[in-house]
Amino acid sequence: MKAEATSHSVITASTGNHAQSVAYAGALFGVRVIIVMPHGVPAVKIESVKDLGADIVTYGAFYDQAREHAEQLAVENRYLYVHGINEPLLHEGVATMHLEIFEEEPRMDVIINPIGGGSGASGACIVFKTLNPNMKVIGVQAQGAPAFYESWKAGVATSTPVNTTAEGLATGRAYELPLKILKALDDIILVSDHEMETAVKTIFEATGQVAELSGAASTAAAFKIKHQLKGKRVALLVTGGNIETQQLIRILGAK
């Protein structure tokens, strides 16, 4: 779709990773990219997207509101709209990170992946359940944004209120494409913002790795079900390290 993208510009909505990937692609191919982000996204994420050459539009309190605005702008301005979740090619791309894990360590027993929009966890299901169905794939959601958890349990897409500071997980509804794929999950764990903050601190102190709250969700879940994981080889996906300096300082200083 390069010709359409070049002539009409590309627009999408995102709270972080998808924004950076589309902005990067736009820079590679000389395409103007507009990213709609909700209010409250850390400045470090906004600046990283701007550094890649994309234009930022801020709208809404969480992802779904930003997405709706992006879709409206796409219609009004004839932009090429790229859905951040219900796009099959996106899932194929994201799934390559799981393929890399399998190639490096094919004996993994459990994979734990955060669920925001669902593409990362979907990629885990696609790769690991295809290559070794015995591998357990576990998703993680914020307690304050449990739409996929509730939908997964009910077997039908539902919406829930959003009340979490983990902006990467702040999604108020389940989306059709990943929900179909995520039926293959073995479990979904809900974690609180406090548990994610504790995991941010643990990851930093143990490895020196900086994680944002949503990026630390898989580690928070692992501690929550640690007795189930004893003796197993476990992969924890740290899906983002874009955290404000003052927030990180506060978390590291917490007792």
Image (tube, rainbow, N blue to C red):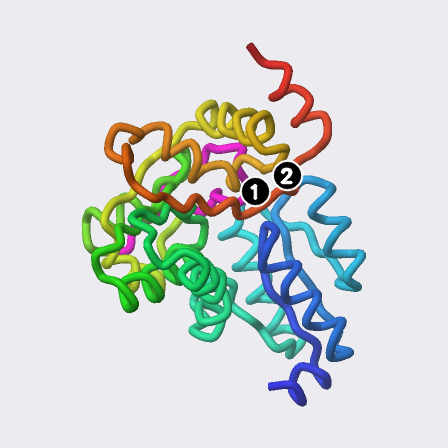
Give coordinates of residue 157: x percent, y percent.
28, 55
Q: Quadrant of residue 77?
A: bottom right
Secondary structure under the numbered disc 1 in the rendered image: loop
In front of the other: 118 or 240: 240
Q: Magenta includes 144?
A: no
Q: Magenta includes 162?
A: yes
In front of the other: 203 or 93: 203
Q: Which residue is mark 2?
A: 40
Contact, CB < 8 Å: mark 1 with mark 2?
yes
Quarter of the image that includes the N terminus: bottom right
Label drawn at residue 61 = 1
Location of residue 137 with respect to 241 vertically, above or below:
below
Magenta region: which residues? 157-172
Q: In the rendered view, does 131 fall on the left or right side of 244? A: left
Residue farthest toward the bottom in the current orientation of the protein: 3
Q: Main secondary structure of the magenta part?
A: loop
Tag 1: amino acid: Ala
Q: What is the distance, in whole Å, between disc 1 and disc 2 at their CAs?
A: 7 Å
The reply to whether residue 143 is in sight is no
